[in-house]
Amino acid sequence: MSGYAPDLTALSNLLSSSDEPQDSQNDRAVAQHRAAFAPSPVPAPVPKKAPSPTPDNGDIWSADEVPDSEGLKFVAANASKLPPPKHEVYYKQAVDSGDVYLGLQDKTPSSTDCTHIVVKAHFPQHKLSDIDLDVTKDVLKAVSDSLSLTLYLPTSVDADEGSAKFDSSKGILSVELPVVLKEW
């Protein structure tokens, strides 16, 4: 074993022979490494524009935040003093087992992938002939002598392709409207 000692000493001298000591080379490499990851100067913060003071009248949105569309104008112009019937809005989607269990298509369970909107309005003790139904691309209006429903729809629909059914035993009007898909 003593025969290996001179070889190891010679190898050690060969590896450490340089003009600078080993510690200063390591210190310089560490300093270069740290300089590469040093933080950049942070710019001064941009002062935020103070919101204009608005009177607190209990409104959720200000007048400039509400979209000015024909549906909102229609609803405001046709507001009725009659109470609205109990109603529900459902989203309908065409899915199969591959969509549900395997996720084969890019459909999500959200309303963005729905194909139809179904509105169910309860008109108890009414006949079909008592209800006047009017549907546009943004608004559904169902009126009887004692109840009035004017509903701004959450998305545009094809009013001409929709269908309506009335269950006289339960007094439920079901309106199914195909959604107009907006292509990007």
Image: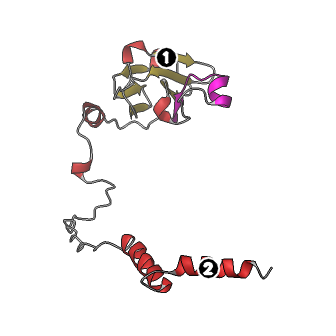
Number of numbered markers: 2
Q: Which residue is mark 1?
A: 164
User: For the point 53% across and 30% down, which residue is it?
Assistant: 107
User: Is 163 or 95 nearer to us in this picture?
Assistant: 95
Crowding near the residue tagged with mark 2, few <14, some 14–19, many ≥20 C-alpha atoms within 10 Å: few
Q: Is residue 62 above or below residue 6?
A: above
Query: x%, y% of residue 118?
Result: 51, 26
User: In whole angstroms, how far apart are the C-alphas of marks 2 and 1?
Assistant: 97 Å
Q: Is residue 69 above or below residue 11?
A: above
Mark 2 and mark 1 lie on one chain; the one further toward the N terminus is: 2
Label of residue 61 in the image: none
User: Is 107 or 53 nearer to us in this picture?
Assistant: 107
What amino acid is found at the position of numbered circle 2 in the picture? Ala
- Element under disc 2: helix
User: Is 110 or 107 nearer to us in this picture?
Assistant: 107
State if disc 1 and disc 2 touch (CB < 8 Å). no
Crowding near the residue tagged with mark 1, few <14, some 14–19, many ≥20 C-alpha atoms within 10 Å: few
Q: Quadrant of residue 41?
A: bottom left
- Element under disc 1: strand
Q: Is residue 80 left or right of residue 91?
A: left
User: For the point 24% across and 73% down, which residue is it?
Assistant: 45
Q: Nearer the viewer, mark 2 or mark 1?
A: 2
Query: x%, y% of residue 21?
Result: 47, 86
User: Is 168 or 46 nearer to us in this picture?
Assistant: 46
Which residues lie in the magenta part? 87-102
One can see residue 122 in this view: no
What amino acid is found at the position of numbered circle 1 in the picture? Ala
Q: Which residue is mark 2?
A: 10
